[in-house]
Amino acid sequence: MTADPPDPAALGTTLRPAGVGITSHPAGAGANLAPGAAGASPDLRPIDATELAHLQRWQGRTEVRSDMLHAAPVRGLSATLDRADPDPVPGSVLPPLWHWLYFLPQSRHSEIGPDGHPRRGGFLPPVPLPRRMWAGGRLHWQAGNPLRVGDAVERRSCIASVSHKTGRIGDLLFVLLRHELHNAAGLALTEEHDIVYRSAARPGDPQPAPQAAPAGAAWQREVLPDEVLLFRYSALTFNGHRIHYDRRYANAVEGYPGLIVHGPLIATLLLDLLRREMPEARLARFEFRAVRPAFDLNPLRLNGQPEADGGGADGDGSRRVSRDGSRRINLWAQDHEGWLTMQGLATLT
């Protein structure tokens, strides 16, 4: 994800409620799916009824992977996000979304395409469309069982659905992944992950109208996602996709004005804003949707606004509660022109 925004006409413009007991995440790590034409090596067949039926044979396919939540990636991401966190030790609670540092795809170098991405195949269906993106996701953390540094974790993944639409810009193929992460105490995290595959860009294709970001956020933070930040995040997530660090490739081959900011990095920065403003908050659910690509050329503004839903509040609204006792925080990112790049909703316990 991160380079090409989903077509709002095809994907919808509202956030779905987070599902309980379901998970999803990319076949490797949350940080590793991005659109790319060159390295994916699709054969560009149209998605007709026969092709769709073939791809839908992947529905229900499962995969189980195990990983140890070592401290080194946590230290690395903390430094990358410019945080002065205590050194992680066994038992330290893993911050939300930092599980994307684990279960990374580690394809052999001979299996990498010209865009730096692994060639298609394996667990995910071999979709014959050249551009793919991580369009959004929904996560649910089990109360009382956080993931911790030192945990041995098993991730159980399933391809929940494969569906097709024809949009204004051609074929759109949707793959819904579900993941469950289990530690020694049982289920800790469930996730849904939306992958969208699109036709190649063509001259004259209609472009989705940009969406203005909301105004009047209670919290704001500006981050410059320069090439060093993007490279370090790519390294932490073993993401070889060249649109994040190879400017010549991003400009000349993919046609982008700058390096693409990883969608998972933006989502992580949004929850990092919440942690900075409410360090004691405990997250129950988070859902997010990619709206528009962000580039390294200009600052990215992160915003947060506690939801005013009829509950009591303190001075800045941060203690507003919903009828079920939870608190909800609207989070969003915008580019230097004020256009919305990512929208999220965090629900606190």
Image (tube, grey):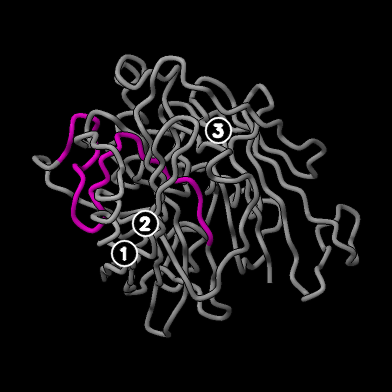
Location of residue 52 in the rendering, given as x and y in whole percent from the top left corner: 30, 51
> Rounded to the nearest whole Å, what is the CA distance between mark 2 and mark 1?
6 Å
Q: Is 238 or 148 nearer to us in this picture?
A: 238
> Rounded to the nearest whole Å, what is the CA distance between mark 1 and mark 3?
29 Å
Does residue 76 show up?
Answer: no
Tell me the magenta residue range: 112-138
Q: Specify the amino acid type for callout 2.
A: Val
For label 2, the SS is strand
Q: Is 72 or 106 nearer to us in this picture?
A: 106
The image quarter containing residue 161 is: bottom left
Which residue matches tag 3? 292
For label 3, the SS is loop
Check whether the beta carbons of the residues at disc 2 and disc 1 lie within 8 A of each other: yes
Which residue matches tag 2? 162
Number of callouts in the render? 3
Q: Earlier in the sequence, mark 2 or mark 1?
A: 1
Q: Earlier in the sequence, mark 1 or mark 3?
A: 1
